[in-house]
Image (cartoon, rainbow, N blue to C red):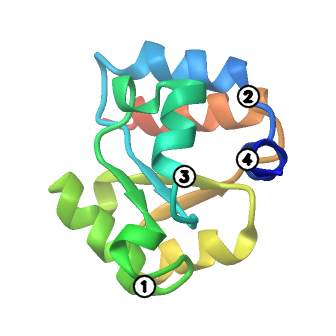
Amino acid sequence: MRADFWDAYCGTGNTELIDYARSLKSRVGLAILSNSAAGAREEEERRYGFSKIFDPICYSHEQGVNKPDPQAYLAALRRLDADPADVLFIDDHQVSIDGAAAVGIRGILHRDNATTIAAIERFLARD
């Protein structure tokens, strides 16, 4: 039953985006802000090795606040030591994009890998 829970919770890893994120590590800071359940850090690390790619990893069950609450984004910004204008937030729920925008973070709604990767590249090329 526990394995079934984590299989449903974690889903299938998007290997194309995970590999793309790995390729960005030398170019930019990468973080995760996730609404989560206790045990998510350990299970996702076991499955995907996120700590080798992302720092910080901000899980809601550890921070005590969920997206889209502005405090979730502000806590992540503090841990990133970043200004909102320097952050691009990606999520597959519009309400979370709206939460990021409320604190000045630009967001994009993930619909497919190609569109998301192109948006990231545009954001990185803006300087």
* Pointers 3 and 4 in contact (C-beta within 8 Å): no
User: Does label 4 or label 2 sit earlier along the sequence?
Assistant: 4
- Report the residue marked by disc 1: 70
Mark 3 vs mark 1, foreground winner is 3
* Pointers 3 and 2 in contact (C-beta within 8 Å): no
87 horizontally vs 13: left or right: left
**Looking at the image, can residue 104 be seen?**
no
Q: Judge whether 44 appears above or below 83 on screen.
A: above
User: Does label 1 or label 2 sit earlier along the sequence?
Assistant: 2
User: Does label 3 or label 2 sit earlier along the sequence?
Assistant: 2
Label 2 element class: loop
For the residue carrying disc 1, how many other residues have a C-alpha within 10 Å: few (<14), some (14-19), or many (20+)? Answer: some
For the residue carrying disc 3, how many other residues have a C-alpha within 10 Å: few (<14), some (14-19), or many (20+)? Answer: some
Name the residue at 49% across, 72% down: 100
User: Does label 1 or label 4 sit earlier along the sequence?
Assistant: 4
Q: Quadrant of residue 54?
A: top left
Residue 8, given in percent of the width and then of the height, sits at 83, 49
Q: Quadrant of residue 82?
A: bottom left
User: Does label 3 or label 1 sit earlier along the sequence?
Assistant: 3
34 horizontally vs 73: left or right: right
Residue 38, given in percent of the width and then of the height, sits at 51, 64
Label 3 element class: helix
**Label 4 is placed on what type of residue?**
Trp
Give the number of the disc on residue 40.
3
Of the 4 image quadrants, the one containing the C terminus is top left
Give the number of the disc on residue 6.
4
Q: Nearer the viewer, residue 26 or 42?
A: 42
**Label 1 is placed on what type of residue?**
Pro
